[in-house]
Amino acid sequence: MTLQNFSLGRLCEGDANVEFVERKGTGHPDTMADALSEAFSQALSNHYLKQCGTILHHNVDKLLIAAGSSAPAFGGGEIIIPFDVYLAGRATTSINGMEVPVEDIARQTVADWLGANFHALDPELSANVRCLVGPGASELVELFGRQRMPLANDTSIGAAFAPLSATEQLVLAAERYLTSQTSTTRHPERGEDVKVMAMRDGHEVRLTIACAMIGKYLNTLEDYAEAKRILATDVLGLPEAGAAGEVAISVNAADDLAAGSVYLTVSGTSAEAGDDGQTGRGNRVNGLITPLRPTSMEAIAGKNPVNHVGKLYNVLAQRICNSIIEALKEVTRVHCALLSQIGRPIDQPARTFIRVLPVAGCSLEKLREPVEHIANRHLQQITDLSREFAAGKVSIY
């Protein structure tokens, strides 16, 4: 089957000498907002599936975390004002005359996620939940269930690339290690609010890492300084650091140790005091923020997984890129962009544009059929994504 509105182009030879790569970790307020939006969507989807066998209309991608107030201290500290989690958006609020307990689902979702993802945060003491979700707009609800193949509820772009560079792999590995249970068990002073920024200039990579240290696990300023040193040493010891080039690391670069001004928290996240979060301001589908690479500004988390192409096409574009790299040894790099049109079947993008960098001697004409086949296969399977999202099998941040 020929894919409509498909075109294949060639990427330029060579890599840029400079890279900027960022990842906001599990406990960063923006990542928290994405995660809570998506967990809420997943909980709603599963409630709808249980009640009527299908996922009903909802978009809960308008979540805001408003920071609280705290008094961190070595050996202790306290939460003074909890941060607020505002869950906003639209959802189906009744099924066959039966009310959907949207607010109860929202509250339980927040408590469960915070409890599962922080080792020093008490959800009851640290967070207030405020649910502002209302019923959906009639025209979008009607569009949602119009025919067997869902119709796109927006005109938007999904974009992706593959493979990851050595710098990108290092940024991912550093954050994932630092927020892992292995790391926080061995070093409980490390909070889950970690941000990693990399700049590569030629063979030199500079990592700037922010890690919210937890006061109750550190007794003195000297303990804090030693914790920073060990953190940098651990990251430099990762295999990805060895593969990335000449790596230098700065940890909590704004610290003024002489003045006693350091990045100390009570719970392990800056949301406790001064740093807000919002859905869509965090990592893209591949877990990174890469402004010099193809990217979409869509807020993916919390959008419904049935016909919101702002969500589906970003995941699908990434899967297409990954599959092309895995299946076609003649391709060394690939970019994919999918453009939707509102009201059009989601398996028929208004435009599919893929660019590849072939190995020497391989023509675009030779690659056109297998690349188009891979893209078409993923588009034909797009409806499977909704159940994958509901089951929590799709990573989007």
Image: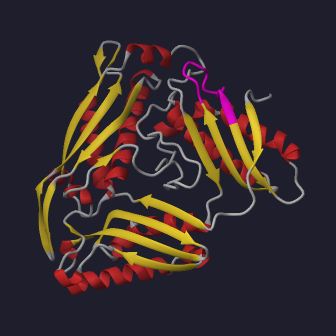
Q: Is residue 32 magenta?
A: no
Depth order, front residue of 8/367? 8
225 sits to left or right of 52: left
Asked whether residue 96 appears in the rendered view, the answer is yes
Q: In front here: 132 or 343? A: 343
Residue pictured at 37% horizontal, 30% vertical: 47
Q: Residue at x 46, y 23 (%)?
A: 53
Report if residue 344 lies within the magenta region: yes
Q: Is residue 104 above or below residue 213?
A: above
Residue 56 image-quadrant placement: top left
User: Residue 63: image x %, image y %?
Assistant: 31, 39
Furthest-left residue in this view: 80
- The residue range painted magenta reads 340-352
Magenta span main SS: loop
Q: Is residue 362 above or below residue 311?
A: below
Colour approach in the figure: secondary structure
Q: Residue at x 39, y 72 (%)?
A: 183
Estimate the x, y position of residue 169 in percent, counting from the top left. Answer: 56, 65
Q: Is residue 89 above or below residue 83?
A: above
Taking depth in this image into account, of 285 and 103 the one nearest to the observer is 285
Residue 57 lies left or right of residue 241; in this view the side is left
Q: Name the quadrant containing residue 80.
A: bottom left
Residue located at (49% from left, 32% from top):
305
Relative to 136, 169 lies left or right: right
Quadrant for the N terminus, please.
top right
Q: Position of residue 153 (x, y in %)?
A: 50, 23
The total of numbered circles placed on residues is 0
**Residue 220 in view:** no
Q: Position of residue 180 (x, y in %)?
A: 41, 66
